[in-house]
Amino acid sequence: MQWSPLTLSLWISLWSGLLALVAGVWFGWLLAKRSFPGKLLLEGLILLPLVLPPTVLGYYLLSALGARGLGPWIEQAFGFRLVFSWRGAVIAAAIAALPLVVQTARAGFAETSAEIEDAARVDGCSERQLFWLIDLPIAWRSIMAGGLLGLLRALGEFGATLMVAGNIPGQTQTLSMAVYDAVQANNLTRANQLTLLLSATALGFLYLSLLLNRRISGNR
């Protein structure tokens, strides 16, 4: 199946944004509500994609998911490979977006006071009920904001996805990769068109997120 760069960018960013949201909510809650050995190390590993060069992050993922890592097992177990496929691009973009989601969700979960949680436990609330009935409703605005940030981060991802998924036209070439190819080929007309398309898409998502945030907060 052949994908246009725009379609592939939207497809990858939506899936990676969703993946980063699910993982980010869990890690955000864990870091905000639990104390355990190695907590600082875990937080550092989660935030590492923010400071690592994208190519270094991509190399780590390529080594982990490639032929010398989990690649053969994944292909045997699930019937597909992650390296040099859109699925690998989803994984790379999700990991790049994860720190933004975790930090935003963590701030939301931290808003729940210990007194409220203790009162709920006294009333017989289990830890699972505490999460679904108290923590999540209080933190949902931050979680939604983090999810939108993760989606936008995934939309603009380039270096890590290039290392893991490659730059295969029609299969793994996103808008950012298509811009790179056009510049390398000195096709400035196409580069300008793709750049405007990517900028308009990102601006559209930003506008929707700002509009949603205003409606949530009750402002016009």
Image (cartoon, rainbow, N blue to C red):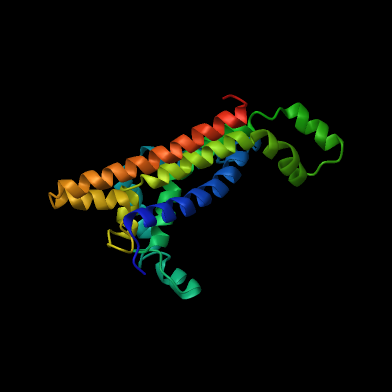
Q: Quadrant of residue 52?
A: top left
Is residue 174 something one can see in this rendering? yes
Query: Which percent across, then down, holds residue 15?
Result: 48, 54
Residue located 76% across and 33% down the image: 117
Above or below, comparing residue 80 to residue 57 in the picture? below
Query: Which percent across, then down, holds residue 73?
Result: 45, 71
Furthest toward the top, the residue is: 219
Query: Which percent across, then down, holds residue 82?
Result: 40, 64
Q: Quadrant of residue 164?
A: bottom left
Residue located 46% across and 35% down the image: 207
Above or below, comparing residue 186 to residue 109 in the picture? below
Quadrant placement of the N terminus:
bottom left
Furthest toward the front, the residue is: 220
Above or below, comparing residue 206 to residue 82 in the picture? above
Furthest toward the left, the residue is: 186
Q: Is residue 139 left or right of residue 132?
A: left
Residue located 27% across and 58% down the image: 167
Q: Nearer the viewer, residue 121 or 111?
A: 111
Q: Is residue 110 left or right of residue 181?
A: right
